[in-house]
Image: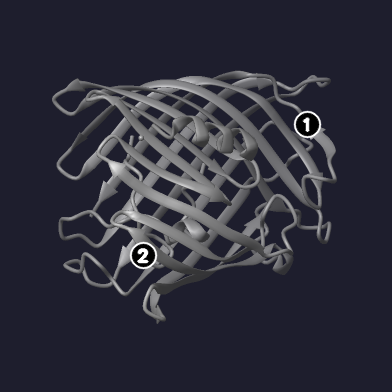
Amino acid sequence: MMMLERGGCLRGRGLVPAAALLFAWLGAARADAQVDSNLLRREWQPEDHWSDSSDKPFFLFKEDVRHSEETVEMFHWESSGRVKTDRTDRDPQFWFGYKVLTVGIAGLETVPHGLYDVGLAVAGKLGSIGPEWTLEACGGVGTANDGSFGNLRAIYPAATVLAVQELAPRQFLELGITYDGNSALAPRLPMPVVEFEAHPDPSLRLRAGFPHLEAEYLPFADLSLRLIGDYPADARLEAEFALGSGLAAFAEAARRLEPFHLREDGRERIFYRLYTGELGLRFRGAGLDVSLSGGWAFGQEFFTGYDLRDRSPVAVPEGGPFAALTVQGTF
């Protein structure tokens, strides 16, 4: 799996037990969206390039719907990335991020429209604060809707400001504030950012605190374990074993919770919750990273409400198989 790296909104492995406790506190959940505070996260790849991108379309085969005679098929596509203005700049002052999430739904009368979350953001380095701290920020706008892109209530802002101190080589303390206008919990409230990032040795990378957790551990040369948590409800656990010649086998367990505004119901939103377990093969080479996988979707539910504290069930699809293609690239 991809190594945890610094950089992102504006800059782009022994401590596992502590990371696991933090992960459990976050509720076992994916932190890849490139319009929120994650945009201040990852270093750029060393070769000259314009953008980094990740796309994962997967198809959920026909499933029965609990307490109903309906069946449903769904198509889920997650896409995110970052774009620089100078392909030769390996430490850009400004860059852009984007995300596109599509949930296509067929056969479910209670959810007659597809669901979409589309966003754009800009990130940059703002300078120093005194001798030890640097200031970074990102801001963007998105729309999370049920196919009605003219719904102004579905438009939401996202912004983060961070003060970063380098405590020691490859160790950073980050303090700041972040706001996600489409958060699944308390979307109108800004949240604090208190995080510690470290790469103490080649086998461990750690990002611990609030609102994100990410830990990658290499217990052996060919095995990597990765844990990701994202407030308030997304999580992913990955294991990958290298087979040689750029090929690897992997397993992943994930939880996703996505909110979308309804076209007729003011502040009311519809939420889609999905758990997945999957196995697959991954190939990396020549700037391209491609994975083929399949697995089982379970724990699915559509419900409405303002946020997670206010839930009205809409539909509960039964578990079923899915097939996925993941493409990550540097262009």
Circle on res. 182: none
Quadrant containing the C terminus in the rendered view: bottom left
The residue shown at (46%, 42%) is 214
Q: Where is mark 2, residue-wise?
A: 11
Q: Is residue 229 left or right of residue 45?
A: right
Number of numbered callouts drawn: 2
Q: Quadrant of residue 168?
A: bottom left
SS of the residue under disc 1: strand
Dot 2, crowdedness within 10 Å: few (<14), some or many (≥20)? many
Judging depth in this view, the residue of 160 and 252 nearest the camera is 160
Front disc: 1 or 2: 2
Callout 1 touching callout 2 (CB < 8 Å): no
**Label of residue 315 in the image:** 1
How many residues crowd around disc 1 within 10 Å: few (fewer than 14), some, or many (20 or more)? many
- Amino acid type, label 1: Ala
> Where does the image place residue 235, in percent across and percent down from the top left?
55, 36
Disc 1 versus disc 2: distance between alpha carbons? 41 Å
Residue 113 x %, y %:
69, 45
Q: Nearer the viewer, residue 297 or 1?
A: 1
Report the residue at 72% width, 59% height from top. 187
Of marks 1 and 2, which one's residue comes earlier in the chain?
2
Is residue 41 shown left or right of residue 76? left
Q: Position of residue 130 (x, y in %)?
A: 41, 81
Q: Is residue 189 visible?
A: yes
Q: Secondary structure at mark 2?
A: loop
Compared across the picture, whether 257 is left or right of 264 comes to left
Looking at the image, which residue is at 45% across and 59% down?
173
Amino acid carrying label 2: it is: Arg
Residue 294 position by quadrant: top left
The answer to whether any part of residue 29 appears in the image is: no
